[in-house]
Amino acid sequence: MLEKKFTSNFEVTYGANIVPIKRIEIFSPEEWELFTKEYLEVLQDDYVEIERIGGANDNGRDVIAYFEPATVKNYKWDCFQCKHYDHSLHPSDVYVEIGKILYYTFKKDYPIPENYFFVAPKGCGTSLSKLLTDKDLLKQKIKDNWVQSCETKITKNADVKLEGEFLNYFENFDFGIFKKTNIKEILDKHKNHPNHIIRFGGGLPSRPKIDEAAIDQIKENELVYVQQLFISYGDESKTKYESQTDLQTNLNYQNHFNRTRINFHYAEQLRNFYRDSLPINTFQDFQDEIYNGIIDTVEDSHDNAFKKIKASEQLASTLQLSSNPLTTVSIVNDRKGICHQLVNDKKIIWKDESK
């Protein structure tokens, strides 16, 4: 008998939510490499550059994290080898990968990495974990399995025999660079990447309410749209307004001015608060939709510039927007505020004084 539980609208539409630790198990190998690269991008303070190579000609490197530019001789780097299997990694899954690092560093195709991490959805199994904590045992196991697992599988161009100078290189190699990773820790770090919500869902965090009483002195980043407000009020009243103090003679303009500044600050908050939670151009796309929705009204003829503002703000408040993620967290204040952001960015103008 099925257990009774509350069923959400999300589940009816999309099915039950899959937790990240399970969702990564259904990633494609390419998605797994991209996810690993995103995780490393969160650690940019540790590395100067992240590069995904992957593919048939990666020479044993899926994702590279550089401590210093690759143009530096014998640059320092970490290697992250992505293995997306339906089981935790066995020693036999990685022998050839270790063999590639040995072979290609011996050939000086690239320097020996500082660390070489295996990244797999189900982690490393007990046998492999044990080997990765005992570099001498790992070395012996690779040596024992070289003919079977490495000799003919490192490159298609030749058999790589463990003999001569290469054997000497093997014997002196530090096998302590090979390490496992903690998938739960990687997922926790990935929460700080803009693509985390796109990959795993979970919704955007709630925004704090702006302290409207604290919005007092006009900041430098408000000067363009504020000046356009003064000009627009003057266009209707035929009175010149040059400062906030001048508006005290007209309560209608003063109230609109105060509301507009609050709306502008809400729009700025929307821009900044979700900046690290969403892909780079998400807010820009949202702002562009507002622009495309109101531009015809902005360019229409109006009795005066203030009426143009009011018509544009009203339209922005009621626009039917796309599935941009910000539509779920935006409010009317944001939409009206974006109208004035567009003025501030000089994408639209309420009144051209030169005409």
Image: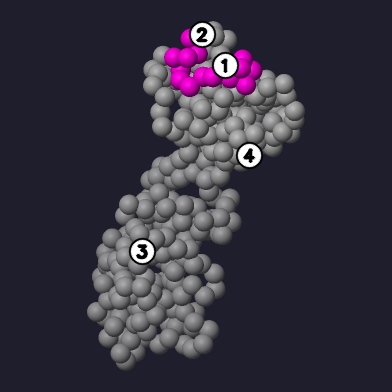
Question: Nearer the N terminus, badge 3 or badge 1?
Answer: 3
How many angstroms separate mark 1 from mark 2 (CA)?
10 Å
Q: Is residue 276 above or below residue 205?
A: below
The residue drawn where x is 34% and y is 89% is 163
User: Nearer the viewer's eye, disc 2 or disc 4?
Assistant: 2
Residue count near mark 1 (Cα–Cα under 10 Å), binned few <14, some 14–19, many ≥20: few
**Residue under circle 1?**
239
Q: Is residue 237 above or below residue 199?
A: above
Q: Return the mark for residue 249.
A: 2
Amino acid type at image mark 4:
Asp
How many angstroms separate mark 4 from mark 3 (CA)?
36 Å
Quadrant where the N terminus sits is top right
- Contact flag, marks 1 and 2 (Cβ < 8 Å): yes
Which residues are drawn in magenta? 234-248
Specify whether 234 is left or right of 70: right
User: Nearer the viewer's eye, disc 3 or disc 2?
Assistant: 2
Q: Return the mark for residue 109.
A: none
